[in-house]
Amino acid sequence: NPSTGDLSAAGNITAYFSDDRLKDRIRNIEEPLKKLSALNGFYFTPNAKAKQLGYNDKLDVGVSAQEVESVLPQVITNAPIDPEYKAVRYEKLIPLLIEAIKEQNQEVQRLNAKIALFETVLNTKISL
């Protein structure tokens, strides 16, 4: 089935638009770590229905469109094989990953500051 084959390109593929001059920002993604924690990356093989639709029987990795839809519905679209099924626009998950890393980094910095404070207090008590 040609609609389920791989897409290959020799050059770069650019989709959508990224220029900030074309966007009215609303807000950053809220609670990105909570959203990311609700998702599972997993290994899978196509089930019988997927094979009927023409997908190759091979081990692959992915996420669940339904799980993604529950936290970031904007990245879900109809599957190209049949609009009855859902698909994830994986490149649209990158903003969630960026915000989650930033949130996690803030927590690491907060914990490092707390550790430094505890070390200072401990060293002060030991030298007394």
Image (tube, helix red, strand yellow):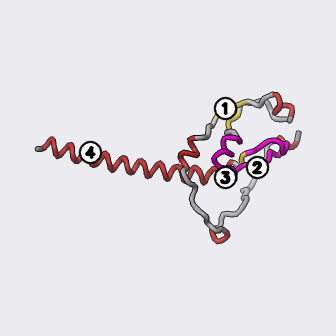
Residue under the image location 72 percent in, 60 percent down: 16
CB within 8 Å, label 2 to label 4: no
Q: Quadrant of residue 84?
A: top right
What is the crowding at mark 3: few (fewer than 14 residues within 10 Å), some, or many (at least 20)? few
Which of pointers 1 and 4 indicates the residue nearer the eye? Answer: 4
Amino acid beneath label 3: Lys
Q: Which residue is mark 1?
A: 43
Contact (CB < 8 A) between labels 2 and 3?
no
Q: Is residue 68 magenta?
A: yes
* The C terminus lies in quadrant: top left
Provide the secondary structure element on which disc 3 rests. helix
**Which comes sooner in the sequence, label 3 or label 1?**
1
Q: Which residues are magenta?
A: 66-87
Marks 4 and 3: which is nearer the front? 4
SS category of the residue bearing label 1: strand
In the picture as drawn, the residue positioned furthest to the left comes out as 128
- Residue 20 is situated, as x and y percent measured from the top left of the image, at 63, 68
Above/below status of 60 relative to 115: above
Q: Which residue is mark 3?
A: 92
Q: Residue furthest top?
A: 48
The x, y position of residue 41, in whole percent, is 63, 37
Circle 2 crowding by C-alpha within 10 Å: few under 14, some 14–19, many from 20: some
Dot 2 falls on a residue whose secondary structure is: strand
Quickly name the residue at label 2: 77
Look at the numbered disc 4 and give the secondary structure of its residue. Answer: helix
Q: CA distance from mark 3 to mark 1?
A: 21 Å
Residue at image x 63%, y 47%? 71
Callout 1 amino acid: Tyr
**Callout in the foreground (2, 3):** 2
